[in-house]
Image (cartoon, rainbow, N blue to C red):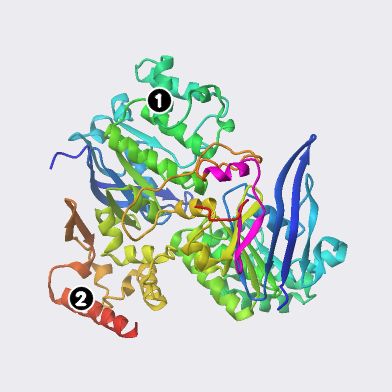
Amino acid sequence: MTAPLLSVRGLTKDFQVGTVFSRRRVRAVNDVSFDLPAGLITALVGESGSGKSTIARCLARLEAPTAGQVLLNGKDVLRTERRGASRAYRRTVQMVFQDPFGSLNPVHRIEHFLTRALVLHGRSAAPEALRELLTSVGLTEDMLHSYPHELSGGQRQRVAIARALAVEPKLILADEPTSMLDVSVRVGVLNLMRRLRTDRDIAMLYITHDLGSARYLADTTMVMFAGEIVEGGDALAVMDAPAHPYTRLLLSAVPDPRRSSGYDPIERARLRDAILNPTACPYGSDGTCSRTEPVRHIVGEDQGHPHWVRCHLRAPATGIANRLLKATDDLKKAETTAA
Amino acid sequence: MDPVLEVRNLRVEYRSDGRTVVGADRVSFAIGPGEIFGLAGESGCGKSTIANAVMRLLKPPAQITAGDIRFQGRDVLALAGGELRAFRWRQIAMVFQSAMNSLNPVLTIGEQIGDIFTTHEKLSRRAARDRAGELLELVGIDPERLKAYPHQLSGGMRQRVVIAMAVALHPRLLIMDEPTTALDVVVQQEIMAQIRDLQRELGFSILFITHDMSLMVELSQRIGVMYGGRIVELAAADDLFAKPLHPYSEALMNAFPPLTGPRRELTGLFDAPRTTDSCGFHIRCPPDRSDCSMNIPDLREVAPGRWVARSTEGDLR
């Protein structure tokens, strides 16, 4: 395996909330480590508030992490570029935001956004370069003179992607790039992202709460819950054989009439309870999970990507794990007999 | 059985500065007692226009220029003044898009729910508060929360409060305009389950509006797919899901990648802003449908209860 493009080690981000008198710290991201390999799309899925966007903002250097390392080609950029990201970093890592209505300044023409990105990074902003950028995202040249309000949401998001592409980045951080778009144009933007990965070898961190699109687009998927990444692996494997209770809960909540075996409401209620009240994990009522941090366990490998999970349930056989596994087996048995 | 709501040949126009935009045209459908009817389509297709027309909430420049709306046999378009006030909420209630932001931030939940009963049922404050508490329990929220302000509740809870308020006076029809768009999947699933339970318990009909076809197929019994102000397909949910007949219905279903099965390439739609006079589908349709690029044809019944917009007889594909 080649070295990853970007590695994150022990990333932690605390936010201060409250007034001077009732200051509290909220941990949005807790000790997160992962690698973003070159030329692959990694999806980061989870509910709102799970810390997905905070990770993206830390990687884009829009937030300063409380602790941890961000290694670009093996160098810790948080150490070498303390005051803010260098232009070289920005040339490598670009971000596409959720809201294409807010991320393009309404008083400028499309031409301006692309020219600025090119000039700031010392490239030629010749008409051919602009034309090439626009066509690469599926837009036409005549839009150069349009204002953002003259374009549809999908077209605006394509402009935002073109702007990111202008500096020929190695990594694009895409924070829910399709959630504000109309249903009919979402697939077009997803296909564009996939084409950029295949044709230009651009790695992407695709942040979303739409599990279907993560399965459709990504090579590997990581599942985030309450500031921690709890499961990761090949995108299809994670969705088809979820190992963590939270992943199962997320999947069970997605409406999908194609799914032949619906989740039974009793199991869903049990999963939900486990998530909202972690001490009441259905698989271990003794509170193991709240007392100790689960460690990573590899549960399989697909397409060369290890499928791992952080859950005591999957721990190699110890006394507790055996008991928990037996509990799940009983549950499954009860389910099959019920069905 | 007589339908609860019947909409016939409805046409809504937005008129300004000598320019007319057709928001909805020749829209007809009926909702039976206890039925869940879905209207699907992307932004700007006219689904919310229909909902607002049924509630009589359209304001100029919007105008209903043709058609009629009947609710349990009564002509809704003829209602005025006090009659209209009594009709709204008591007969038809509506849960708006991003409804959770429609709560008043400076009043407690209890005061806002209580207002319904003091205004519409002339209850005393005390009795109203008790009823409000019962209502919260109905949607699974602790009545203690009556004292809470909207910002102290999560998005999902606020949405539930709004749904509870909508069903407070036991309406015969509940209109829900994208009730869960702003919510997470897990919360969305809970809200939908809640709505289904309430519907079973109270027996009202639902007009459910969303762009999420999967969600719609799971909840509704019949679905109308709207495009460019027209209904292009009207069918039982299962039939539509099994085999969409109109290319737009199919495209809408393909807009959400599936969670199971092999990964296959989906084709997105055309993402230029469309004008009302071009269908946008001529690129995907067989050549004999070229005559519909200027206009969407009327619905034809191709099987019992199954309607699709097509110009000629014969198979679409």
Looking at the rendering, which quadrant does residue B30 occupy? bottom right
Q: Are marks 2 and 1 in contact (CB under 8 Å)?
A: no
Is residue B315 toward the left or the right of residue A230 in the image?
A: right
Residue in view at x 59 percent, y 31 percent: A150
Judging by the rendered image, the residue that carries numbered circle 1 is A133
Please tell me whether residue B132 is drawn above or below residue A36 in the rendered image: below
Horizontal and vertical percent position of residue A299: 18, 62
Horizontal and vertical percent position of residue B220: 56, 68
Judging by the rendered image, the residue that carries numbered circle 2 is A325
Residue in view at x 31 percent, y 48 percent: A218
> Is residue A302 magenta-colored?
no
Horizontal and vertical percent position of residue A148: 55, 30
Residue in view at x 49 percent, y 21 percent: A112
First reached walking from the N terminus: tag 2 or tag 1:
1
Element type where label 1 sits in the image = helix
Name the kind of residue labelled 1 in the image: Leu
Is residue B21 toward the left or the right of residue A60 in the image?
A: right
Q: CA distance from mark 2 to mark 1?
A: 54 Å
